[in-house]
Image (spheres, rainbow, N blue to C red):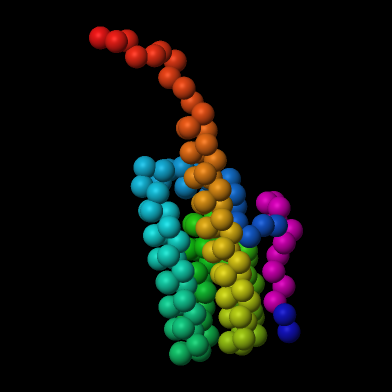
Amino acid sequence: MDLEIDRTSDRSWALIDREYIGRIIRATASDPELFDEVIHQFHQSTLERLASIRQRPSLENACFQVHALKGAAGTLGAEGLRRAAEAVEREIEGGNFVVRHLDDIERELKSGLEELRRENKELRLSDAEISGQMRPLVGPTGD
């Protein structure tokens, strides 16, 4: 049984929330590696949460880990992953959780991370191009 992932919320269905991610990327512009590190840490913690569920597949552990993952994904703007986690959380709450549902989360994680990295690169290039096109309003004074 495939999970039903809600694709009909107020925001259009997307792997990431581009507007939100753009704000995060711009906020970290002074340290370009910071966003990359955030993505890396998010990826690692998500893999650890999924491994924890596989190692201890109790409903209580799965509920805790998936709920935390849903929150982290939402905080990072990884909408596809947040919605997949939300769908798995509903399954857990309904007592229908099976470990194979984690495959849905892993697919969304991979797709979402690729999209986050691509968006980060595109926004940084776009900002660099804009910065490179700007010319000073006043030339050197020769003082």
Name the residue located 60 percent from the left edge and 56 percent from the top edge: 16
Q: Nearer the viewer, residue 141 or 50?
A: 141
Residue sitting farthest toward the left: 143
Screen quadrant of the N terminus: bottom right
Say if 78 sits above or below 21 in the image. Answer: below
Q: In screen coordinates, is 93 left or right of 120?
A: right
Q: Nearer the viewer, residue 14 or 129?
A: 129
Q: In screen coordinates, is 104 left or right of 54?
A: right
Screen quadrant of the C terminus: top left
Whether residue 53 is in magenta: the answer is: no
Name the residue located 61 percent from the left edge and 69 percent from the top edge: 108
Estimate the x, y position of residue 120 in percent, counting from the top left: 51, 51
Say if 74 sits above or below 52 in the image. Answer: above
Name the residue located 49 percent from the left edge and 26 percent from the top edge: 134
Say if 59 sits above or below 109 in the image. Answer: below
- Magenta stretch, main secondary structure class: loop
Estimate the x, y position of residue 92 in percent, counting from the top left: 59, 80
Residue sitting farthest toward the front: 142
Q: Nearer the viewer, residue 117 or 57?
A: 117
Residue 99 seen anywhere in this rendered image of the structure: yes
Estimate the x, y position of residue 2 in percent, counting from the top left: 72, 80
Q: Which residues are magenta?
A: 3-12
Estimate the x, y position of residue 111 in percent, counting from the top left: 61, 66
Q: In screen coordinates, is 137 left or right of 8?
A: left
